[in-house]
């Protein structure tokens, strides 16, 4: 029997994504700050390296704005946001006050839902992915229906676990950040 009800299909797809995102969350929760930082850096580098084609894809698909302006937004998301968070400690022991015997410990909150608008879809995915993963959280994106294709472009696809390894390949874009993260063989 084939489902034809779009609402039921959407609910099942969401359930499937959440199951996979929870698996990814468990993997992320075992990573240290260095591993998390490698993943975030890889997202920044990919966003910057592909700012132009992503901007063109977003403008072409949505019909909103000028692709040249979207390049600026993609670069802002990829570089300025990255520069703002790159040195932040977000997982593990963040601060220790020995005198008062108090520790601040960074722990992930869990799976995050990332809403993606049609106005700036690619820059939104870049910065939300970096921020979520910087905190050790998995993220599942829900794009506007008029902006789905551009966020599934090659630069927006990645397997963050691969970046956690120091010897990770330079071209790791195999799977969408909208999909579950897990290690993939080249």
Image: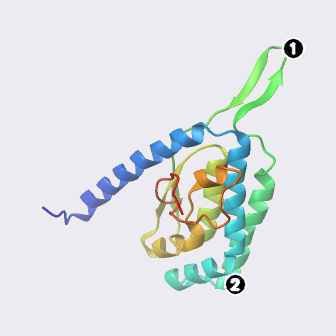
Give the total number of marks visible in the rendering.
2
Instruction: Give the residue at mark 2.
Output: 68
Q: Residues within 10 Å of mark 1 (few under 14, many from 20)?
A: few
Assign a secondary structure to mark 2: helix
Q: Which residue is drawn at the image coordinates 21% and 63% (left, top)? A: 5
Instruction: Give the residue at mark 1.
Output: 99
Q: Residues within 10 Å of mark 2 (few under 14, many from 20)?
A: few
Determine the CA span between mark 1 and mark 2. 54 Å
Query: Between 18 and 118, which is closer to the camera in this rendering?
Result: 18
Q: Position of residue 181 (x, y in %)?
A: 51, 53
Q: Which residue is drawn at the image coordinates 74% and 27% (left, top)? A: 104
Res. 119 in view: no
Quarter of the rendering containing residue 56: bottom right
Residue 167 in the image: above or below residue 171: above
Quarter of the rendering containing residue 76: bottom right
Q: Position of residue 170 (x, y in %)?
A: 68, 65
Residue 141 in the image: above or below residue 152: above
Q: Residue furthest left?
A: 1
């Amino acid at each position: 029997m084939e489902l034809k009800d779009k609402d039921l299909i959407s609910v099942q797809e969401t359930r499937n994504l959440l199951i996979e995102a929870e698996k990814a969350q468990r993997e992320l929760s075992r990573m240290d700050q260095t591993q998390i930082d490698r993943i975030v850096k890889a997202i920044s580098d990919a966003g910057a390296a592909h700012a132009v084609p992503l901007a063109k894809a977003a403008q072409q698909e949505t019909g909103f704005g000028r692709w040249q302006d979207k390049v600026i937004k993609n670069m802002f998301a990829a570089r300025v946001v990255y520069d703002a968070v790159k040195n932040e400690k977000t997982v593990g022991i963040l601060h220790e006050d020995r005198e008062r015997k108090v520790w601040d410990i960074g722990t992930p909150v869990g799976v995050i839902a990332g809403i993606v608008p049609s106005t700036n879809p690619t820059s939104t995915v870049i910065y939300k992915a970096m921020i979520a993963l910087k905190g050790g959280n998995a993220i599942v994106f829900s794009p506007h229906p008029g902006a789905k294709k551009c966020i599934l472009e090659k630069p927006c696809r990645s397997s963050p676990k691969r970046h956690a390894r120091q010897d990770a390949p330079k071209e790791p874009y195999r799977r969408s950040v909208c999909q579950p993260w897990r290690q993939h063989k080249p």
